[in-house]
Amino acid sequence: MTAKVAIVMGSQSDWETMTCAAEVLGELGVETDVRIVSAHRTPDRMYEFAKGAAAAGFEVIIAGAGGAAHLPGMIAALTHVPVLGVPVQSQALSGQDSLLSIVQMPAGVPVGTLAIGKAGATNAGLLAAAILANHDAALSQRLQDWRARRSAAVTERPES
Ligand code: RP5
């Protein structure tokens, strides 16, 4: 089976964040293809990946980057495969730069932008699973079970 979800990131340093997307998708039994693809350091690799994404069978691309985070937008410009952008928390501006770089796409080239950091990466994974679940009943059930377990884990009152 080939992976339907690609997780790409601009740098090895983004993996600490982006591993959260891979982790939750793993829990849901969704295979991922994880790569480092930098828009400014490996632009040819980025172009080749994005142009070939649909033919490679990817149905969702999760792209994480920090700082002047143009990777998700550039990938979205090169493919019609839906792109979920994860703003990685930068040191200089705590990820606000990443967030604004990713979220402010001009009309016509959408990037579904998540929260800054690990919460965003986890939610990108969950959204990717939900998208695939639209045509995968078994995955849909696993996702619903996952959510039900999370709800069941919340106690009614705080434990002392
Ligand atoms: C961006 O610059 C990457 O996405 C990363 O978040 C940030 C810092 O990269 P490194 O200097 O750690 O390689 O391209």
Image (cartoon, rainbow, N blue to C red):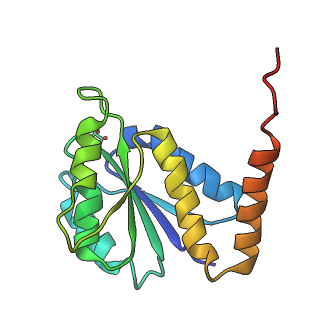
Q: Give the side of residue 23 with respect to residue 57, left or right.
A: right
- Total numbered badges shown on the rendered structure: 0
Residue 37: quadrant of the picture: bottom left
Q: Is residue 51 above or below residue 95?
A: below
Instruction: Compare residues 109 and 12 and report the one nearer the observer.
Output: 109
Q: Give the side of residue 152 with respect to residue 80, left or right.
A: right
For ligand 1, the image quadrant comes to top left
Picture quarter with the C terminus: top right
Q: Give the residue furthest to the top.
A: 160
| Spot occupied by residue 131 in the image (x, y as percentages of width and height) | 55, 72
| Spot occupied by residue 80 in the image (x, y as percentages of width and height) | 33, 80
Instruction: Compare residues 155 and 54 and report the one nearer the observer.
Output: 155
| Spot occupied by residue 150 in the image (x, y as percentages of width and height) | 74, 46
Residue 158: quadrant of the picture: top right
Residue at horizontal 61 percent and vertical 79 percent from the top: 134
Residue at horizontal 72 percent and vertical 55 percent from the top: 147
Q: Is residue 39 above or below residue 76?
A: above
Picture quarter with the N terminus: bottom right
| Spot occupied by residue 93 in the image (x, y as percentages of width and height) | 24, 29
Visible residue check, residue 3: no
